[in-house]
Image: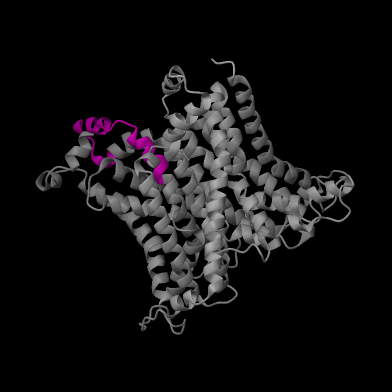
Amino acid sequence: MILARRAGAPRDARSADPRRRTFWALALPPALALAVLLVAPLLFMAALSVRTDLSGTLLAPFAPTLKHYAQFLATPGFIRSLGISTLTALGVAAAATALAYPLAYFLAFRAGRRAAFYLVLLLVPFWTSYLLRVMAWKLMLGGEGAINSVLMWTGIVDEPISALLYNRGAVVVTLVYVWIPFAALPILAALGRVDVRLHDAAADLYATPFQQFRRVTLPLSLPGVIAAFLMVFIPTVGEYVTPLLVGGTSGTMYGNIIQDFFTRAANWPYGSALAMVMLAGTLVLVAVGLRLVSPRRLLDR
Amino acid sequence: MPVGRRPRRRLLGGYFWLVVALLYLPIAILFVFSINANNTLSFPLEGFTLAWYERLFETPALLRAVRNSLGVAIWSSLAATALGAMVAILLSRFEFRGKGALTGLAVMPLIVPYVVLGVALLVLFRAFGVPLSLVTVGLAHTIVALPYTTLIILARLVGSDAQLEEASMDLGASYPATLRLVVLPIAAPALLSAWVTAFTVSFDEFALALFLAGREPTFPVYLYGQLRFATTLPVLIATAVLLMLSTLTLILVTERIRRR
């Protein structure tokens, strides 16, 4: 506290701060890392998105053009894909948050002394390989997978059901499954700050348990709910790996289009424009989200 | 307590255990698959074997990919922890212009979709003629782990008493000495958590590595490349089961140390 105040004192006092030189030693490495590995790449990508093509070196001067953005706007398929990806991410985030809420509620108010252990139990699957958990779903849902072979073994079906895998439904189920434990964390943090005496107060005022939940607990936990929603939405909207594994051709997302332009199609400028569109969209949505939940509360977690 | 609460409590607990069971089901399936005699998972099972685990150690490319992943995860997690500690000290102990900008940039990798960051780094490395390698993967992992390490260490520093540092300097210690002798010991448990978090983030990361790994694959990239070949699948899963157990051990051990 005192140190912070001293550092914030007027200029002449600050130059007397013995920590001045250390400040630069602390500030330069992270500033440099962020500038080179975060700011510079995004700026280069922005610059590439207004280039005609990839001729010459990337550092050579060029006449900027908006043709890739115009081309994007003139391609209904891409705009539709962006819309579908956004809807998919909204749906996955809403489902994961809703399914995680009772888990967090159980841990916060019902689990008692074992809550810490139960929480670890919930998080262990999250520490196991993402790629592998997705693959496990593939093993379960696939034509030769566990569900189908059990169904056939027990004689419920004669032919394997192929509709389980390689479509958007499979992508959504997989993603919701992957994110549920993660979504429970911010909700649990918010519920942990709810004063339990408010429950007693509500009960004393003859609130039914449901009213008590709807008018007291739920509103107080809302920041955690919004944080959980955003923490699932952001990685999901840019997802391209899960669709590659379980999505098939009908389950592709916007991220797959970007990936395609940088790999198979090898049209980097166009791909950069598509990536810029996604970046802008995500930043706007996060800005709106942060309006709803103050960043301080997120940091308190 | 009102009588009507009991069934509701059971319902909530039942739901919790149902979700936990569903979360562990695929992991259990992977485990069964790794000791399954047949290389497709069809019921009824035809017997068990440890052959896949033996085969694992006779597949040099696989071992090499695991070693690559370990190297990338160790170096990038150390770098992310060091940088995160610096940012956390700056944010919790200093007032300066650009503090808001630093906060924003340090958490920004959480907001930028991985596919966007991946292609942006690809563009940058290409512009400067940096060849793709495990180093470029490690750099990307350092930057995506930075928000986690920063927030974990920051939470600890904000919750600790800055007057200890004041006292240390009043007693004649220089600020660098104070950082080493007072701040780092206070932050030690958080540094450990931050490192483990960064390690697991890197070790498991695939979306960025697929863009940025050159000829040398990390384990997830190798795994992805091999998924097409059904015959190697059991060996891959056996490896993954071993790695999963190692990661868990690492987390539990560090948690033990941290609690002490």
Whether residue B95 appears in magenta in the rendering, the answer is no
What is the basis of the colouring in this image?
one colour
Q: Predominant secondary structure in magenta?
A: helix
Task: Give residue B97's position: percent from left, percent from top.
Answer: 22, 52
Q: Is residue B189 visible?
A: no
- Residue shown at the point (42%, 19%) measured from the top left: A201
Is residue B214 visible to the viewer in this orientation of the structure?
yes
Instruction: Specify whether B92 is left or right of B229.
Output: left
Looking at the image, residue B89 lies above or below residue A268? above
Residue under the image location 29 percent in, 45 percent down: B90
Q: Is residue B171 magenta?
A: yes
What is the quadrant of the N terminus of chain A in the image? top left
Can you say which quadrant of the picture contains the C terminus of chain A? top left
The quarter holding residue A84 reads: bottom right
Residue A272 rendering spot, x and y as whole percentages: 46, 71
* Residue at position x 42%, y 78% in the image: A58
The answer to which of B204 and A289 lies nearer the viewer is A289
Q: Position of residue B186 (x, y in %)?
A: 36, 33
Q: Vertical placement of A60 versus B1: above or below?
A: below
The total number of labels drawn is 0
Residue A21 versus residue B219: which sits nearer the camera?
B219
Where in the figure is residue A87, as x and y percent of width and height? 54, 57
Which residue range is magenta in the image? Answer: B150-177
Q: Does A109 appear above or below B251? A: above
Determine the residue positioned at 11% across, 43% down. Answer: A13
Q: Is residue A99 above or below residue A157?
A: above
Q: Is residue A136 left or right of residue B126?
A: right
